[in-house]
Amino acid sequence: MKVDYIIVGLGLAGLAFAEELLNAGKTFLVFEDDSQTSSLVAGGVYNPVILKRFTPVWNAKEQLDIALPFYKKIEEKLNIVIDEKFVIKKAFKSIEDQNNWFEALDKPKLIDYLDPKLDSKSYNGVIADFSFGNVNETGRIDTKKLVESYRDYLKENKLIRFENFEHQELKIAQDLVTYKDIETSKIVFCEGFGIKENPYFNYLPLNEAKGELLTIHSPELNIDFLLKSTLFILPMGDNNYKVGATFNWTDKTSNPSIEGKEELVEKLKKVINVPYTIVSQSAGIRPTVAGRRPLVGVHPEHKQLVVLNGLGTRGVMIGPTVAKNLFNHLEKGEAIDEEVNIKRFKKK
């Protein structure tokens, strides 16, 4: 069997690259073993503003200009709805918080997103003594529906194998790679945290941060916006809300923990004051990189081996952009953005 590409892993990164290949008429086969769950449990929010510091997300406008049409096209292609638009309301904790918001309004890259008029309304159940700031041009991609629907699409078209990829079975020649019964010119590894087990790219400094979320049911809360405070509360419909998220740099499992639950419950006390019940808890390992820039590029010794990884917490925004950049590099000679190119890390 011969294909132009093999993709290892079908989270947001692998999916975005597969879509580039489909649009270009390239042949490929995906390997997916369900070992990485970060894309399935991700909040999926796209937001061009870092609300902790009121600073712009790196290349936010450029990323959204590519990402939003990308998801729209997939919605039409798969006949699904995955893009939910809403306003993010930042609950201010102090007058200083408000002042920092107004200072941020002077930044050219933020003027289109931050509302200069504060929202002083009272929302039942929400603790906010110093009003809210509205962030516009925001929303959420339902990453679970996206990935599961796309996997089904690939399965129907016989473009995916649900099995573990065995790196030791690779045979690298000058112009091609053989993997078991498959010959290909390029293998793109989109393995998330699984890159730690990849003998060709495990030198890259990928950090793993466990994130946990709760889904709660709270009829009295009744908000239709994403509330950003000590944590975020995301409406999911039917009075259900996703609450998160934790950051744990020591626990490397994808199992929900009592500690994660207790941390979120404790923070919730400072954000809402109405009753709720916990419906479920989920966890995943985020592949993150120092400097919050993805890992994109070609292996320094084997030009047939490629990596697309480390999308981090803003994967729904940056994924389509870096996938397009990588595809254009491999097929058209376009330079990979220096800030994401793996050449910034030397192989030891």
Image (cartoon, grey):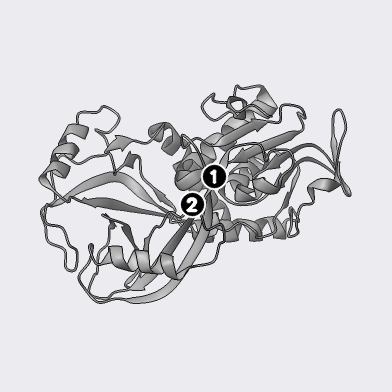
Query: What residue type is disc 1 on?
Result: Asn
Position of 342 with respect to 183 (left or right) is left
Could you tell me which quadrant the C terminus lies in?
A: top right
Q: Residue at x 67, y 41 (%)?
A: 202
Query: What residue type is disc 2 on?
Result: Trp
Residue 96 screen position, x and y as percent: 13, 42
Q: Do we see residue 316 in this rendering? A: no
Element under label 1?
Answer: strand
Residue corresponding to mark 1 = 207
Q: Residue at x 19, y 41 (%)?
A: 115
Q: Do we see residue 314 in this rendering? A: yes
Check whether the beta carbons of the residues at disc 2 and disc 1 lie within 8 A of each other. yes
Q: Residue at x 71, y 60 (%)?
A: 156
Picture quadrant where residue 24 is located: top right
Q: Mark 1 packing: few (<14 Cα in 10 Å), some, or many (20+)? A: some
Residue 231 screen position, x and y as percent: 31, 57
Picture quadrant where residue 36 is located: bottom right
Disc 2 from disc 1: Cα separation: 8 Å
Viewer-proximal residue, 213 or 186?
Answer: 213
**Vertical placement of 338 versus 60: above or below?**
above
Q: Which mark is residue 249?
A: 2
Q: Mark 2 packing: few (<14 Cα in 10 Å), some, or many (20+)? A: few
Q: Residue at x 44, y 73 (%)?
A: 280
Position of 121 with respect to 172 (left or right) is left
